[in-house]
Image (spheres, rainbow, N blue to C red):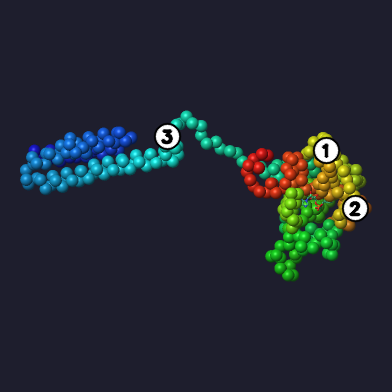
Amino acid sequence: MALSQFLDALNALESSAVRAFGAAADEPALESARVEFLGAKSGQLKSVQKGLGALASADKPLAGKRFHEVKAAIEGAFQSAKDRLASLADEEASTDDGGPLDPTLPGTPFTLGRLHPITQTIEELTEIMGRLGFSLADGPEIEDEWHNFEALNIPFDHPARDPLDNFYVAAATLGEKPLLLRSQTSTVQIRVMEAAKPPIRVISLGRVYRPDEVDATHYPMFHQVEGLWVDRRVTMADLKSTLRLFATSYLGRDVHIRFRPSFFPFTEPSVEVDFQWGDGWVEFGGAGMVDPAVLTAVGYDAEEVTGFAFGLGIERLCMRRHQITDIRELFRNDVRFLRQF
Ligand code: FA5
């Protein structure tokens, strides 16, 4: 046999074997390709090898070298086909318990997130008060003592200013104005009145902070909704009808509302606001007629205008609406709980 003929046969064998192993899509196909090309008895490599003996001795070294190259290439193609099928099998086992892929099975559904119940409550309260003509106002959560206390007629020696009852910001150093996390949204009353002249009709909803002991109805961070209406001849009757409309819009027509005499430094007279809950009454917040001292502190003429203000706990409203009995549920961030709203 001529050398060139032998080398041509080797080249043809190499390309058909590499193609066959590359195309083997499963174990049986791979095995039959193995038998065809690498089979010990009648594999094609074996039969080409037989031609080696018929070559002239001078051609044998070159022919033998090329034969071993082709043999290594074919065995390599077999090994990589084997590895490829093994890793495919692993993948299937890990995604589908080893069973074959069933393209007709439904996919993994995307679950849509939803707004936190407190955010939902804030949005709903904003809309209700918007219908009553109240626009939205905002203020910072880190406040100075003027807005949190002084302008609200809470003097320096008032117990509400006790550092133990407030979250003062440690970064405010000696000589600088002390700063604290606001303990009530009433701060926004001052910010709004400093910035605008009457008539004023705003609400503000946001976070407030108090170092209260945590229990089923108290949390160190909670939310309040503050309302403020200042104009000529605003009366206590306006306050009561506004709060009644607010309560029935959010909680339903059968909710009753009750005022109890109380004291806040920034309102006079002041009341606690209770809503009926089952057989009993629950306190939702405080309210009253804006104290003339507050109107004067922001530069209003207390002889000309009057106003009412209220501040209610948003968690309590949300809990009352959804029959949530423990405020801590709202902040545990357990999606099984939050998904219900
Ligand atoms: C005030 O904060 C006054 N600023 C309310 C006010 C505004 C009076 C305008 C007059 C005019 P009080 O401290 O009572 O009031 O708090 C109001 C409501 O916040 C409470 O009734 C309660 O619903 C809620 N609240 C108070 N502390 C907590 C707490 N630790 N966790 C959850 N809610 C709370």
Residue 67 lies, with reference to residue 300, above or below; the image says above
Residue at x 75%, y 64% (from the top left corner): 178
Decide: few, some or many residues near mark 1? Use Cα within 10 Å; few <14, some 14-19, many ≥20: some
Disc 2/disc 3 C-alpha distance (Å)? 76 Å
- Tell which circle, 2 or 1, labels the residue nearer the N-terminal end: 1
Check disc 1 and report the residue beneath it: 255
**Which quadrant is home to the C terminus?**
top right
Mark 3, secondary structure of its residue:
loop
Check disc 3 and report the residue beneath it: 99
Check disc 2 and report the residue beneath it: 268
Q: Residue furthest front?
A: 279
Check if mark 2's residue and mark 1's residue have beta carbons within 8 Å. no
Q: Position of residue 327 (x, y in %)?
A: 72, 48
Q: Name the side, left or right, on which 231 lies relative to 32.
A: right
**Which quadrant is home to the N terminus?**
top left
Mark 2 is on which residue type? Glu
Disc 2/disc 1 C-alpha distance (Å)? 26 Å
> Which mark is nearer the camera, 2 or 1?
1
